Image (spheres, rainbow, N blue to C red):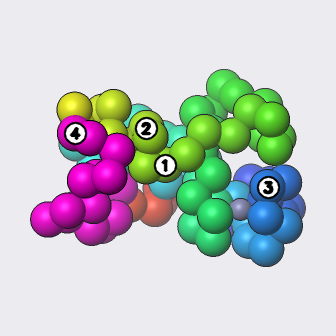
């Protein structure tokens, strides 16, 4: 899986890579270092980054602080093949 963006513009530590939600299959871009999140049609940049936790909280309808209570990343998302 090739990185789609050389280096995350937020943390400059990791490649931004393509993942997808396991339930619906929608792809998105994620930096696993700082959890910066972009939908595919977003311009990848520091100012346009969402936070994975916020997106998942909204998607699952759970409170922000409880997103990863009883679930892990691998329950929700997986690398896009
Ligand atoms: Zn990052």
Q: Is residue 15 above or below residue 76?
A: below
- What residue is shown with label 4? 62
For the point 43% across and 38% down, the residue is 55
Give the number of the mark in front: 4 or 1. 4
Question: Mark 2: few, some, or many residues within 10 Å (few <14, many ≥20)?
Answer: some
Question: Mark 1: few, some, or many residues within 10 Å (few <14, many ≥20)?
Answer: some
Ligand 1's quadrant is: bottom right
**Mark 4 and mark 1: Cα distance apart in space:** 13 Å
Is residue 2 among what the camera can see? Answer: yes
Residue 55 got which mark? 2
Mark 1 and 2 residues: CB-CB less than 8 Å, in contact? Answer: yes
Give the number of the mark in front: 2 or 4. 4
Is residue 1 among what the camera can see? Answer: no
- Residue 15 image-quadrant placement: bottom right
Question: Mark 4: few, some, or many residues within 10 Å (few <14, many ≥20)?
Answer: some
Question: Mark 3: few, some, or many residues within 10 Å (few <14, many ≥20)?
Answer: some
Q: Is residue 76 above or below residue 54?
A: below
Q: Is residue 25 above or below residue 16?
A: above
- Residue 2 image-quadrant placement: bottom right
Provide the secondary structure element on which disc 2 rests. Answer: helix
Is residue 56 rendered magenta in the image? Answer: no
Query: In this image, 13 relative to 20: left or right?
Result: right
- The residue segment tinted magenta is 62-77
**Mark 2 and mark 4: Cα distance apart in space:** 10 Å
- What residue is shown with label 1? 52
- What residue is shown with label 3? 10
């Amino acid at each position: 899986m090739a990185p789609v963006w050389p280096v995350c513009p937020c943390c400059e530590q990791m490649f931004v890579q393509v993942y997808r939600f396991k339930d619906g299959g929608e792809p998105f871009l994620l930096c696993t270092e700082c959890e910066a999140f972009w939908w595919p049609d977003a311009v990848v940049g520091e100012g346009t980054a969402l936070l994975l936790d916020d997106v998942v909280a909204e998607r699952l309808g759970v409170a922000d602080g409880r997103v990863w209570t009883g679930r892990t990343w691998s329950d929700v998302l997986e690398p896009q093949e």
